[in-house]
Image (cartoon, helix red, strand yellow):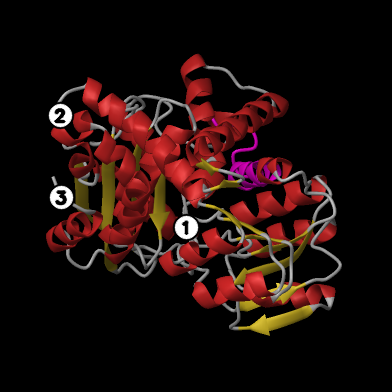
Amino acid sequence: MSNNINDFIEALEAKTPGEREFHQAVQEVVESIWEVYQRNPRYQKAKILERMVEPERVIMFRVPWIDDQGEVQINRGYRVEFNSALGPYKGGLRFHPTVTLSILKFLGFEQTFKNSLTTLPMGGGKGGSDFSPKGKTDNEIMRFCQSFMTELQRHIGPNTDVPAGDIGVGGREIGYLFGQYKRIRNEFTGVLTGKGLAWGGSLIRPEATGFGAVYFVHHMLENLGKDIAGHTFSVSGFGNVAWGAISKINELGGKVVTISGPDGYVYDPDGIKDEKVEYLLELRATNNDIVEPYAQEFNVEFFSDRKPWEVPVDIAIPCATQNEVDLDDAKLLVQNGCFLLAEASNMGCTADAVEYLIENLHYAPGKAVNAGGVAVSGLEMTQNSQRLNWTREEVDKRLHIIMREIHDTCVKHGKNGSRINYVKGANVGGFVKVADAMLAQGVV
């Protein structure tokens, strides 16, 4: 057992060199739960933490496929099955050129605690490929997905590992993946979530991460004696997460004034609402992730190669990708009057930004805020097991209850006087449940 946090992290870094994102994710959790770990000799004797940072299984494989020109292409596929103490591995598949083992380990590690917080019986996992769907035809994407699933199907199943979508994996990709699984295994089971409504999907799944994030923010504000109505929001990205968040903020009376893409951000002082939200869907459907066309369509300002965190707002919700808010962004947000930041993206803030934000505003981490997506995936699994389809209202009601319970867990473990450390609350709440399950199941 390491004597202190630095020794533990140094040993991990020596064992897993170059895995920067994974090290960052582990350090955040370890710093939060170290006191709890030190107070529990049973955890230490069983080396729960040392086991917890080691994935139960890492699968890496070649994905050959043929493009429309008849050329053989080769990508790399992964599935990191991190922890199954609470249930089948659960977590998305990401198709993006930036996918590496480090990123998938960080996401799988985070997923373990996120899934624990949902109260649903799900373990943690993550997977994907360095393949990019952008610029590919439907037939090319289908051939890639079929090749990818030909190998992945050996390692997953409704009671073993249930992948979902993530960046680059939407309804189209899930359909191709599911079709190939069904063809090879000759069974129709709930092995993937994010499916189409006609063949086992759940209502509000596309919006769930964004909806859940806003429900979590609602509970944070309620704890402060405030409400969403009347507040201005800065949102990054314009994919499913941002779309869901914007839709729910509008419904609850808030005003979203920014969206962003890799080309820059749009500032719309009148609010992104009504037909503008519908336009976001059309823009995303063009398979092009730039947002400048929105500015041209609605005659608003576009800021090239800049981030939306320079706009004065009350509340910020990062919805794009990891480490999108750095220390300078965090300082600018606080300087401009932002009093709350909730991560809807996974590890949306850099470590130094998180440290600053915890001290200067009300901050909540992605593993708590964005758990609504995997929560509704879990509800989809339940519906598949029961061979039932719940109504939109039923799914939304259950999602709201889950997000309230996650917030209550964060308060229980993170409250210190009049302030709540949501990072500590989420990490300790998620850790204790997984750790106790690991203890009960022995050294496996």
Task: Return the residue at label 1.
Answer: 168
Residue 396 horizontal side relative to residue 385, left or right:
right
Q: Give the alpha-carbon distance from disc 3 to disc 1, as whole Å.
A: 39 Å
| Residue range highlighted in magenta | 200-218
First along the sequence among labels 3 and 1: 3
First along the sequence among labels 1 and 2: 1
Under tag 2, what secondary structure?
Answer: loop
Residue 442 horizontal side relative to residue 92, left or right:
left
**Residue 98, image x and y in percent?**
36, 67
Under tag 1, what secondary structure?
Answer: loop
First along the sequence among labels 2 and 3: 3
Residue 102 horizontal side relative to residue 381, left or right:
left
Q: Give the alpha-carbon distance from disc 2 to disc 3, as whole Å.
A: 21 Å
Q: Is residue 150 above or below residue 397?
A: below
The answer to whether the residues at label 2 and label 3 have Cβ atoms under 8 Å apart is no
Residue at position x 62%, y 65% in the image: 236
Q: Give the alpha-carbon distance from disc 1 to disc 2, as whole Å.
A: 34 Å
Q: Is residue 268 above or below residue 168?
A: below
Task: Return the residue at label 3.
Answer: 2
Tell me the number on the disc at residue 209. none
Quadrant hosting residue 190: top left
**Residue 61, image x and y in percent?**
20, 53
Would you call the spot at circle 1 few (<14 residues within 10 Å), some (14-19), or many (20 or more)?
A: some
* Identity, as a three-letter code, of the amino acid under mark 2: Val
* Identity, as a three-letter code, of the amino acid under mark 3: Ser
Task: Return the residue at label 2.
Answer: 444
Q: Is residue 420 visible?
A: yes
Q: Residue furthest top?
A: 386
